[in-house]
Amino acid sequence: MKNNWNKVVSSLFFNLKQAGFTPLAVDNGDGKVTTPTWKEALEEATACDEASVYLKHPDRENRIWLYIVLGNSPEELVADYTVFEPIEAPLAKFSSVWEGKPCPTI
């Protein structure tokens, strides 16, 4: 059995999408890859153990950065991020859903 991080990262991305964020790029250690869709961002973000995810939000001109670590517990998937008030609620919602739960397995 191995961890199925797709479900966890999809849950994070769903919350971000609902809050008006859109994907720009992902760097999983192989260089930045433009990811215009959430599906492409998911594929890149789950290809390695850690990734920088770059997002856009209508209330901010500059990009927003998330650092995700697939080795963390699901609720702590996001290890670091750009301080930006509109990202707080979707991150908190995501963490509360996954609090105390193990990563799903395949």
Image (tube, helix red, strand yellow):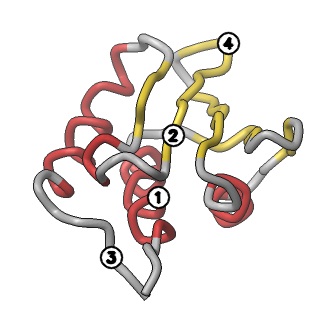
State the quadrant of the C terminus: bottom left
> Residue 29 sits in which quadrant?
top right
Q: Earlier in the sequence, mark 2 or mark 4?
A: 4
Image mark for residue 62? 4
Say if 26 sits above or below 101 in the image: above
- Looking at the image, is mark 3 or mark 4 nearer the viewer? 3
Look at 22% across and 45% down and name the residue there: 95
Instruction: Kindly state the secondary structure of the residue where label 2 is placed.
Output: strand
Three-letter code for the amino acid on which mark 3 is drawn: Pro
Q: CA distance from mark 2 to mark 4?
A: 19 Å
* x and y, in percent, of residue 9 in the image: 47, 58
Question: Quick one: 42 or 30, which is closer to the camera?
Answer: 30
Circles 2 and 1 in contact, beta carbons < 8 Å: yes
Instruction: Kindly state the secondary structure of the residue where label 1 is placed.
Output: helix
Look at 54% across and 31% down and name the residue there: 67
Circles 2 and 4 in contact, beta carbons < 8 Å: no
Three-letter code for the amino acid on which mark 2 is drawn: Ile
Circles 3 and 1 in contact, beta carbons < 8 Å: no
Q: CA distance from mark 3 to mark 4?
A: 34 Å
Image mark for residue 30? none
* x and y, in percent, of residue 6 in the image: 50, 70
Look at 60% across and 43% down and name the residue there: 50
Q: CA distance from mark 3 to mark 2?
A: 17 Å
Circles 3 and 2 in contact, beta carbons < 8 Å: no
Q: CA distance from mark 3 to mark 1?
A: 11 Å
Three-letter code for the amino acid on which mark 1 is drawn: Val
Where does label 3 land, which residue? 104
Image mark for residue 9? 1
Where does label 2 land, which residue? 68
> Residue 54 sits in which quadrant?
top right
